[in-house]
Amino acid sequence: MKFFLDTADLNEIEEAASWGAIAGVTTNPTLYSRIGGKLSDFHNHIKRICDIVDGPVSAESVAMTRDEIVRDGLQLAEIADNVVVKVPTMVEGLAATKELAKHGVPVNMTLCFSVPQAVLAARAGARYISPFIGRFDDISEDGLEQVANIVTAINNYDFTSSTVNGEQVEIIAASVRSANHVTQCALMGADIATVPFGVLKKMVQHPLTDRGLDSFMKDWEKVQNA
């Protein structure tokens, strides 16, 4: 399973990239605003991220009609070769995804919550589909089960005739909020998990690892002082 860092913070992206831990980034204007960014500079910020990350960088369109989404998506795609356009799962988004795919622009269809939505997204030509785990948890439903259903359904079929360059549709487990979410997504066969930097750091940690490191350091101090 690959990891996409869910952030707009360049320091977090540079640090995670230095670990060899991330294969891409997902971001949006809201995340950018949280670090003091302005919508007018969003495209320039995407370029900065693309300069750091070799893999896909999903940049979200803020448009709501198909023509506006296509126009916005084409502009985003011009920023760098590794830009993927994030489009919400809705009628206008499906129509825009079909058109963007015709132009060779890969789409990450986001805000997906059901198997029918995921299949429609794949048929429209989405390169990535992002079902949200955490949003289900917010309404006391099992988000992991929903994502597992989508993974199974998409893997039942070959959608390569619909996607840009005939690539297989990949499922991104989005809104991941814990290391346990990551574990379960890996076990169900999700292709990618989007993780905030805080979750990525917790994934490295384990109490037994910490105990082992502490024991190692104490033993090493004894050797040095002998």
Image: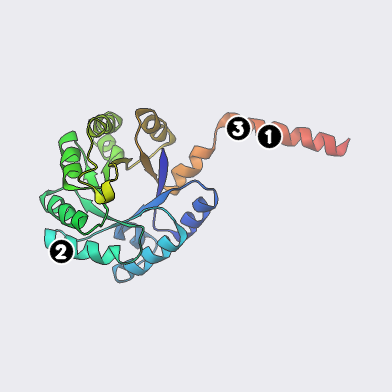
> At which x and y percent is residue 158?
23, 36
Q: Three-letter amino acid code at disc 2?
A: Glu
**Residue 52, relative to residue 88: is it above or below?**
below
Residue 2 location (% of width, % of height): 41, 42
Location of residue 73 with respect to 207 vertically, above or below: below
Amino acid type at image mark 3: Thr
Spatial CA span between label 2 and label 1: 56 Å
Between circles 2 and 1, the one closer to the viewer is 2
- Which x, y percent locates residue 32? 35, 61
Within 10 Å of the Cα at label 1, are there few (<14), some (14-19), or many (20+) other Cα atoms? Answer: few
Distance CA(mark 2)–CA(mark 3)? 50 Å
Q: Position of residue 4 (x, y in %)?
A: 40, 47
The residue that disc 3 covers is 209
Residue under label 1, please give it. 214
In the displayed structure image, the side of residue 61 where residue 38 appears, left or right: right
**What quarter of the picture does the C terminus occupy?**
top right
- Name the residue at 22% across, 40% down: 159
Asked if residue 65 can be seen in this view, the reply is no
Residue 68: assigned label? 2
**In front: mark 2 or mark 3?**
2
Q: Which mark is residue 11?
A: none
What's under tag 1, amino acid-wise? Asp
- Dot 3 or dot 1: first in sequence order is 3
Marks 2,1: beta carbons within 8 A: no
Which picture quadrant has residue 175? top left
In the image, 43 versus 153, the foreground residue is 153
Mark 3 surroundings within 10 Å by alpha-carbon count, few (fewer than 14), some (14 through 19), many (20 or more): few
Q: Is residue 72 left or right of residue 194?
A: left
Q: Nearer the viewer, mark 3 or mark 1?
A: 3
Which comes before the other along the chain, label 2 or label 3? Answer: 2
